[in-house]
Image (tube, rainbow, N blue to C red):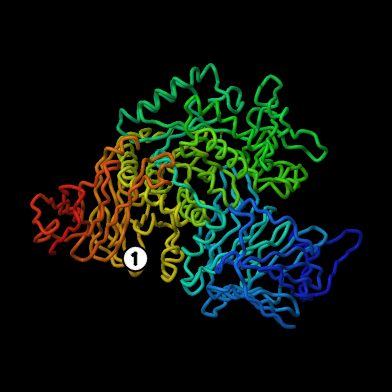
Amino acid sequence: MRSMKKWAAGLAPLLLLTGPQVQAAWQGVGAAMQAKRAGEEVSFVTAGGARVVVSFVTPDVVRVRMSADGKLGRDFSYARVDNAPAPTKIEFDDNAERTELRATTGGTRVVVQKRPALTITVYDAQGRVVVADDPARPMAFDAATGAIEASKQRDAYELYYGFGEQGLPTISREGQFLVNWNTDSYKYPVGTNPLYQTIPFFIALRDGRAYGLFFDNTYRSHFDMGKSDPRRYAFGADGGELNYYVLTGGAERTPANVLRDYTALTGRTALPPLWALGYQQSRYSYMSRAKVEEIARTFREKKIPADVIHLDIDYMDGYRVFTWNPQTFPEPKQMLSALHHDGFHVVTIVDPGVKFDENYAVYRSGRDSGIYVRDATGKELHAKVWPGICAFPDFTDAKARAWWGELYKKPLSEGVDGFWNDMDEPAVFSADDFREPALAQGPQKTFALDVQHAGDGDPGTHARYHNVFGMQMVRATFEGLRKLAPERRPFAITRAGYAGVQRYSAVWSGDNDASWDHLALTIPLLTNLSISGVSFVGADVGGFAATTTPELYTRWMQAAALTPFYRTHSAVDTDQREPWTYGGEYERSNRAAIELRYRLLPYLYTLFAQNEESGLPPLRPLAFDYPQDVDALLVADEYLVGRDLLVAPVVVQNQRARNVYFPKGEVWIDWWSGVRYEGGKTVKIEAPLERLPLFVRAGASVPTQPVIQHSGEMKNAPLTIAVAVGATGASEIYQDAGDGYAYRKGASRTIKISARADKVSLEIPKSAAYQRVVAVELLGLDAAPATIAIDGKTVRDAVFDAAGKRLHIPLPNENVKEISFVR
Ligand code: GLC
């Protein structure tokens, strides 16, 4: 398609006609004919007939809208939290050549050059160019097809992170051509694009400074990040407006600022229920109640911690959503209550396809409520998925979402705790051989492009709303759960999504493969998705689509142990896959990985609380926190958990030691051995089968707890604060009830710790409601300190572990203010 298009940049309207066929033609917007200020926006009409509107959402976020036909559509966005924000006040200068807009505070400027063609340049408060249109290719459109595109100048050394979920093995996406079209990609080969999610947002890095760009368009869209021409990048879509935001990153120009501003625009993930951060066990499918109970029992017998069991499609009656198979899952209430008693929570899968069956109450109810998607002729759309022929709620219709949300009443009352929305790209079966990757990725795997949607008041085709279908489905799920059980935090997980999906759901990376390549892929895939606003992310541990090997499964268990969503899942035709499946050293190593997760659960929970506040996610690529460290920018086999933990999993077969790059400007302490590493160096680290290489940043304080069997045991588990000594630093630990919303009314506690060379100061607010702090552990000490004192009183019961270079200091109570030590 694209190769057929010709460029007519900056020229008068020009349509290339070749023979009987109309060849698509790019037409530049042309010169700005007129600039007009209306309120806090400046609007331009161009020689090409387009309208361009520039405004500020905040002093650090510039918005550009371009409509090819000169008419702006409804200003509505599925991505944005607030569709009617008060625009930031601007100052405005205009002359024949250029228009300048300034936010009245902050210092960001936008200069619109009017001719030869309208181009936009954004400057930061220091007067540096943040990003500039490429004058050789100004904004353009194709009047025949409705396609639109913008191009920006690019520096050879500019790198790009984010773009949601991409199957690419590199961490930066420069030189790539990326497509956004939510696609059911069974067993996707490494390099596959597009996958299941559309998050048209990225963070650019140039000379250590960041900016972000969010292209809010729900049609099939693309990013050409210097692939066609390294001197520019381009983004565009098959239709709609060219509606995008430039996020300058504020005064500091950091990735963190960009992401904070992006998540202010598109929303943040609320603190999940604590149990959802525990280990989760899944399989397509555990076929009966007896099997599920056996799995649950085995976890407890073998003392392998776990919080959640997932029930895949076979729990249903003929795959009819919101039913149970009466033969294999009789008396679900009883089963669920027994599982709860043993500390398990249960998540069931719920697909969008509602079986077309006159004898099925859910189908009839949907039909009678008129909520199903209709084809171009107005008939109820029918397509094949697991249950056979199905109808599909139109989730872009508020009425359908409300109807769908209500359906959760039954499973909630039976005791189901969370819900897994799958196949919501939407995916349909195109042929009997739907498992063939070639077919799986074809356009026939979803609804026809002319299928109709309500579009929440702006009806349109599937071409326009395809990419938001999954997000609106899981929104319906989330909003239904909020309404039905207002005292509980919903837990939903979705495969498809659009920018802003993080407000409603966790996301997993779909049908990955049991290969070493796929294990390695999880790091660039999940970290980039995470800094695209989607913070609650994970990949199927072990690789979904094939039988794993013992070593691969163990390494995957380790690599995923500190990723936000931690779940083993495997396909129907693969061998059994539980942490104990391979016995011996593998079972011991898998248990150890899960135990590590549980020991650090208070830290992960704190990160999720901070994420709700700031939009800064638990999982990050190194570049996110070290944008100035050129050696960190392309590291694709390590990740950060918050600012303080560096994880370097083994993702290569037979490897028992690996090189680890330590980001510059810090000292890193080996979690296991206490050995210290100066940042800015690469060091070979031992990584025997049972160990995940893990490092803590000197100056950081990380809460830990003893191994527990599930998060329900956490409340009574004593807390030990691990302080990585050798640098100054301040940390916080967040605690609350683990579920519900009392925390939003102040029912929580934040412990403050500050570390200095010879002192640790604590501020522990008085409360008996949360896990008690019972000890501080100093990490990275070469020898036991000569003296240790708590609030001036000498300590005699500290225990030094020379092998781990760790000093364990019991605290008499929570009133302790200061621990001092002489090294
Ligand atoms: C899809 C999902 C997978 C699930 C299967 C059956 O392939 O991605 O996780 O197990 O459907 O429901």
Q: How many marks are shown on the rendered structure? A: 1
Quadrant location of residue 379? top right
| Foreground residue among 83 and 292 | 83
- In the rendering, at what x and y percent does residue 642 appear? 39, 56
Q: Is mark 1 within 8 Å of ligand 1?
A: no
- In the rendering, at what x and y percent does residue 29 appear? 77, 70
84 on left or right of 537 = right
464 on left or right of 194 = right
Q: Secondary structure at mark 1?
A: strand
Residue linked to disc 1: 682
296 on left or right of 417 = left
Three-letter code for the amino acid on which mark 1 is drawn = Thr
**Quarter containing the N terminus:** bottom right
| Foreground residue among 166 and 363 | 363
Crowdedness near tag 1: few (<14), some (14–19) or many (≥20) residues, C-alpha within 10 Å: some
Q: Residue furthest right?
A: 20
- In the rendering, at what x and y percent does residue 671 appear? 27, 54
262 on left or right of 431 = left
| Foreground residue among 773 and 58 | 58
Residue at 39% in and 52% down:
607
- In the rendering, at what x and y percent does residue 402 appear? 63, 36
Q: Quadrant of ligand 1?
A: top right
Whether 236 is drawn above or below 279: the answer is: below
Residue at 69% in and 78% down:
99
**Quarter containing the C terminus:** bottom left
Whether 469 is drawn above or below 27: the answer is: above
Residue at 18% in and 56% down:
805
Residue at 49% in and 60% down:
260
Whether 347 is drawn above or below 531: the answer is: above
